[in-house]
Image (cartoon, grey):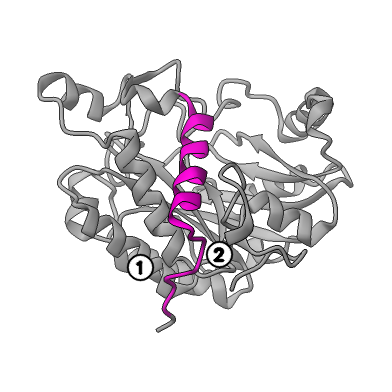
Amino acid sequence: MMKFKNNQDFTKLGPNTKRYYTFSNYLKDKFGKKVYKLTLDAGFSCPNRDGTISSGGCIFCDDSGSFSMAHSSRLSIKEQVKTAIENLPKRFKAEVFLAYFQAFSNTYAPLDVLQKTYDEAFCDDRVVGISIGTRPDCLDDEKLDLISSYKNPWLELGLQSAHNKTLKLINRGHDYKTFEKAYLEAKKKGIKVCVHIILGLPEETPQDMLKTARILSNLEVDGIKIHALTVLENTPLARLYAKNPLPLLSEDEYCSLVCDIIEIMPPHTTIHRVGGSGLSASLIAPLWARNKFETMNKIDRILWERNTYQGIKYCPV
């Protein structure tokens, strides 16, 4: 029976209590206090948008680059850190922080530029770690060595799907093997890795989506972020959707799949996200994705109704 650190087992918890290992709980376990991620924007681009690989980007990605709220600010990293800490609502009660580089590909620059950028994030002693969102094809040994030199480093790698047919269809610009190589090299250097996947990608069946999750489970990833495919304004997907609306997952279908994935993930894998955020202004469909808290509550309730929890179906290879 998997248990919380206070020895309370999952099957005795109510319908509104997490039966999975949230990233916030992991951070609290590690640091002994509330930790908050500061979303930062270094102004980097992406090889899938600047013409190196493609000029169109992934079909679902808009101009903000993974929904960054800081993208238009163009403040220095030091200014962004200071401003974010000063403006945090008191209700968050955060005492220390992770610097989170989110928008676009945050290893897509020369090594000296990356080092200067990352160094600036540690301008406040309360910043206790770094999390860097990027693509697997924007990493090499030197960049991984740099990232591993910082305290408490995390990489957030976009995979979306483990199926090459799907990756080609969504114009991802890399294959699964590229991801696997980057992931394994990062792990060799002691970097924790959170992997992003999207449920409901075109032409994928529930079985396809669960196969992606099982592959990540076999890799024993440190963390996972689960998203539903959403149609955002000013994206290639929006233009396709306007001509011929593709079927999107209903909220019930999505929540059920998320619970299936939670069940097969290793108990130590941290669940960073199970629903989107910051979507309402540009969201075209599905409209249920506007309310992430309702979705999260539904996931909690399904796990409770199933009397199940993270790792119950995990099968180490």
Q: Is residue 100 left or right of residue 90?
A: left
> Residue 33: x percent and y percent?
85, 50
For the N terminus, the quadrant is bottom right
Say if residue 105 shows up in the picture: no
Which residue is more in the foreground, 240 or 94? 94
Residue range of the region highlighted in magenta in the rendering: 291-315
Q: Position of residue 29 (x, y in %)?
A: 77, 60
Vertical arrangement, residue 171 with respect to residue 84, above or below: below
Mark sitting on residue 214: 1
Q: Is residue 310 left or right of residue 282?
A: right
Residue 286 placement: quadrant: top left
Distance of label 1 from label 2 (alpha carbons): 13 Å
- Disc 1 secondary structure class: helix
Residue ID at (15%, 31%):
246
As drawn, is 124 to the left or to the right of 291?
A: right
Residue 269 tag number: 2
